[in-house]
Amino acid sequence: SASMDQNLSGEFMNTYHFPIIQSLFDDAFQVLANIIGDYHCGDATSDGIINVTDVIYLINYLFKGGSVPSLLQAGDCNCDCKITVSDIIYLVNYLFKGGPKPLC
């Protein structure tokens, strides 16, 4: 299916969703998580603590060409199988506004 999404520049773009591919992607993440071991959703730095350092790490990754989180799923705080500014907002909301715990 297709939908229109707005990017950070305010432009609209077509986005295509493929449920079968999404399912395969989810399965691959689960296999990888089982191989690597335990991780904490929102712990982008993989230091075992979810804090402002993880927010900064994700900002650097997305906007400054910083290092990829060692386990991408740990940076996917809102569980949509991608790391975007929404994950940063979700994590800030969790840490500073009493929002829900990261979901991945």
Image (spheres, rainbow, N blue to C red):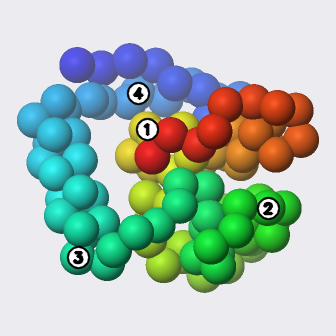
Q: Are marks 3 and 1 in contact (CB under 8 Å)?
A: no
Tell me the quarter of the picture where residue 69 sits.
Answer: bottom right
Is residue 79 rendered to the left or right of residue 16? right
Which amino acid lies under the numbered mark 2 shown in the image of this protein? Asn
With respect to residue 75, does 15 lie above or below? above
Q: Callout 1: 10 Å neighbours few (<14), some, many (20+)?
A: some
Q: Which residue is mark 3?
A: 35
Q: Is residue 3 visible?
A: yes
Cα gap from disc 3 to disc 2, whole angstroms: 25 Å
Q: Secondary structure at mark 4?
A: strand
Depicted 17 relative to depicted 78: above or below: above
Amino acid identity at mark 1: Asp
- Mark 1 or 2: in front is 2
List the residue tagged with mark 2.
51
Number of residue marks: 4
Q: Earlier in the sequence, mark 3 or mark 2?
A: 3
Local crowd size for mark 3, using a 10 Å CA cut-off: few (<14), some (14–19), many (≥20): few
Q: CA distance from mark 4 to mark 1?
A: 17 Å
- Give me the C-alpha separation between circle 3 and circle 4: 35 Å
Q: CA distance from mark 1 to mark 2?
A: 21 Å
* Image coordinates for residue 38, horizontal then vertical, percent: 40, 69
**Residue appearing at x 60%, y 26% in the figure:** 6
User: Mark 4 sits on what residue?
Assistant: 14
Depth check: 91 or 14 in front?
91
Say whether disc 1 or disc 2 marks the residue closer to the N-terminus: 2
Closer mark to the observer between disc 3 and disc 4: 3
Mark toward the start of the polypeptide (4 vs 1):
4
Residue 30, image quadrant = bottom left
Q: Amino acid at mark 4?
A: Asn
